[in-house]
Amino acid sequence: MSDLTASDVPRLPRGVRLHFDKVRQAHVLLAPERAFNIGDTAVMTLKLVDGSRTIASIAATLAAQFNADPTVVERDVIAMLGELKGKRVVET
């Protein structure tokens, strides 16, 4: 269970970055001595994680982009970012 809320402002910690791997033709999340393969939805979400937007703002942007229910998107964003926080590649 995630301890994140819609008002939290997620950011990537020092040393963690989103990177496009030209060899694999896919985005990866790079962290010291680790790399995570991530899907397209995670890439779109992480591109919005800038240390100034709240989770609610990120979810609203994604919901508008995909014409989806903001409540459902917010729940999914919280779950995904919560998993990444548990892996110490996202912090609030």
Image: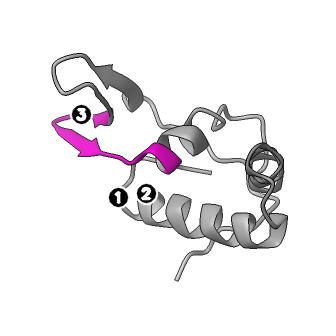
> What amino acid is labelled 2 in the image?
Leu
Image x and y of residue 2, in percent: 56, 75
Residue 13 drawn above or below residue 69? above
> What number is the disc on residue 32?
3
Element assignment for label 1: loop
* Mark 3 burial class by Cα count in 10 Å: few <14, some 14-19, many 20+: few
Tell me the crowding category of disc 1: few under 14, some 14 to 19, or many 20 or more residues within 10 angstroms, Cα based.
Answer: few
Quarter of the rendering containing residue 17: top left
Q: Which residue is mark 2?
A: 84
For the residue marked with disc 1, what is the amino acid?
Lys
How far, Cα to Cα, is label 1 from label 2?
A: 5 Å
Residue that numbered label 1 is attached to: 87
Residue 30 lies in magenta, yes or no? yes
Dot 2 surroundings within 10 Å: few (below 14), some, or many (20 or more)? Answer: some
Q: Which is in the foreground here, disc 2 or disc 3?
A: 2
Left or right: residue 53 versus residue 12 is: right
Residue placed furthest toward the front: 67
Q: Is residue 1 left or right of residue 26?
A: right
Please provide the residue range marked out in magenta: 29-41
Name the element at disc 3. Answer: loop
